[in-house]
Amino acid sequence: MNVQKKIRLPKWLEMFLVMMKIGAFTFGGGWSIIAQMQRDFVEKRGWLSEQDLVDQASIGRSLPGIMIVNTVAIFGYHMGGVAYGILAAVALTMPAFLVMTVVTICYSAVRDNVWIAKAMVGVRASVVPIILSACITLKKSSIQDWMGWAIAAVALCLFLFTNINNILIIVLGAVAGLLIRGGKEKRHDLS
């Protein structure tokens, strides 16, 4: 009888290894990493709900610094406190740090390489559908009614047609949400 026993890793180690894998094999920046987190943490492992991921990404985007590092630190904190937050950020950034160290050392040999330039065209193009997929999936928990669509449309117009800072757009979205949802809560409490 050949029954294989599944080895159960400690939660911190499993999170560290998954974050390193995401950091090593996800190209295209923060939003493509959010798409991978959605697949690994929401769908596969059930560590987060879609709403939690959207909230964490929104907070991470609103804070100063690198959006995805902020987001994974918040995720790690959600998983197990400050130590997990630090561990998640280190695990995600370690592969990129190591690759950038090697690329920096070998930059002169790599910078004019035609094959690398051609490969990067394909990598950039293949990232677009991954990012769009994350947007479509996360839209379900981010935009739930016509008011959400209205706030999103106004935010998009402000982003595309003005020079308003992204942080101010996010703050305005939060204020709009508070005013709209806060008003509904007050009316509901009075009835």
Image: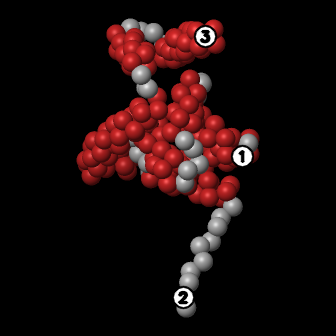
Element on which disc 2 rests: loop
User: Which callout, 3 or 2, points to the residue nearer the camera?
Assistant: 3
Q: Nearer the viewer, residue 176 or 134?
A: 176
Q: Residues within 10 Å of mark 2 (few under 14, many from 20)?
A: few
**Mark closer to the chain start, 2 or 1:** 2
Is 59 drawn above or below residue 190 in the view shown?
below
Query: Which residue lies at the image location 68% right of the left edge and 40% below the top edge?
Result: 77
Query: Disc 3 vs disc 1: Cβ atoms closer than 8 Å?
Result: no
Marks 2 and 1, how far apart at CA: 36 Å
Q: Which residue is mark 1?
A: 80
Q: Amino acid at mark 3?
A: Ser
Residue 59 spot, x, y in % from top left: 58, 27
Question: Residue 45 or 187: which is nearer the viewer?
Answer: 187
Q: Is residue 24 visible?
A: no
Q: Amino acid at mark 1?
A: Gly
Residue occupying image coordinates x 51% and y 39%: 50
Of badges 2 and 1, the one in the foreground is 2
Q: Which residue is mark 2?
A: 2
Label 1 Cα neighbours within 10 Å, binned few <14 / some 14-19 / many ≥20: few
Whole-percent x, y for residue 97 in the image: 55, 47
Relative image position of residue 168 (x, y in whole percent): 52, 12
| Mark 3, residue position | 191
